[in-house]
Amino acid sequence: MTTRILIADDQSLVRAGFRLILESQADFEVVGEAADGEQAVGLARREKPDVILMDIRMPRLDGLEAAQRILGSPPPSGGESLGGRPRIVMLTTFDLDEYVYSALRVGACGFLLKDVTPEQLIAAVRLVQTGDALLAPSITRRLIERYATRDSGSGLSREIAGLTPREVDVLRLMARGYGNPEIAERLTVSEATVKTHVAHILEKLQVDNRAQAVVIAYESRLVTPGE
């Protein structure tokens, strides 16, 4: 199955470089390039990509607003994108960027620094296309830890309070950056069982991906920075 990718960045060299890397993979297809947020929104609605690489800072409309418009739209009817909506990965020059955190809150799957290696770029697209999030690197956890504390509530949200004890255990480990195999090992259960728990967590929290669930875990103080 071919993964359809949209690249949105105001630097033509970045777009060209990413296209060259991605199209070296037989199962990747770059379906469009956008030089600003307005173009990104229009191309996303027309081309229905599976994955969007979105620069956080662009003219006319920045990446955050563009992501909000794309993810806030109803799922495209008859579209081929995964889960009805594209998976958005934010691109940034700064590893601790407040705008990236805001993008995670509205539904982006994670972020990449623009100096990413070709191997890391390809691996990231493959990761998010399966429904996972770019949360493993410690830099992403630091990002969430830094900005989530400012918006955190006084206690557990009603949605988190509705999780089972085992689902809470899984969410805590997700928030610490562990993937399904590591969670399964730590809880001594099968990876299939972990996937089921994750699916239930996303449904109960009413979010689309793991990144949003982790943000909620920090903002509700289920986990705390440095824990």
Image (cartoon, rainbow, N blue to C red):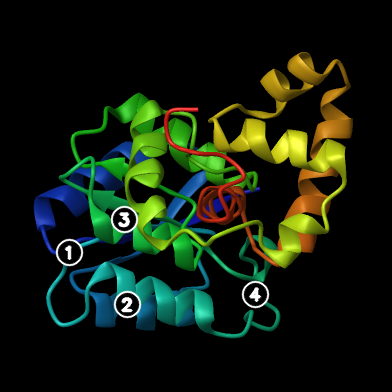
Image depth: mark 2 or mark 4 in front: 2
Sequence-wise first label, 2 or 1: 1
Residue under label 2, please give it.
65
Please give left or right for residue 222 compared with residue 190 in the image: left
In the image, residue 15 lies at what x, y percent?
21, 53
Place residue 78 in its image quadrant.
Answer: bottom right
Sequence-wise first label, 1 or 4: 1
Mark 3, secondary structure of its residue: helix
- Specify the amino acid type for callout 4: Gly
Mark 2, secondary structure of its residue: helix
Place residue 195 in its image quadrant.
Answer: top right
Task: Estimate the spatial distance between the alpha carbons at disc 3 and disc 1, rounded to whole Å.
Answer: 10 Å
Residue 100 badge: 3
Image depth: mark 1 or mark 4 in front: 1
Please give left or right for residue 223 compared with residue 118 in the image: right
Residue 141 position (above or below residue 219)? above
Sequence-wise first label, 4 or 3: 4
Residue at 77% in and 52% down: 201
Residue at 41% in and 28% down: 137
Residues 26 and 172: in front is: 172
- Specify the amino acid type for callout 2: Glu
Residue under label 1, please give it.
57
Few, some or many C-alpha atoms within 10 Å of disc 4 (few <14, some 14-19, many ≥20)?
some
Task: Estimate the spatial distance between the alpha carbons at disc 3 and disc 2, rounded to whole Å.
Answer: 11 Å
Residue at 31% in and 70% down: 64
> Is residue 55 in view?
no
Residue under label 4, please give it.
79
Image depth: mark 3 or mark 1 in front: 3
Sequence-wise first label, 3 or 2: 2
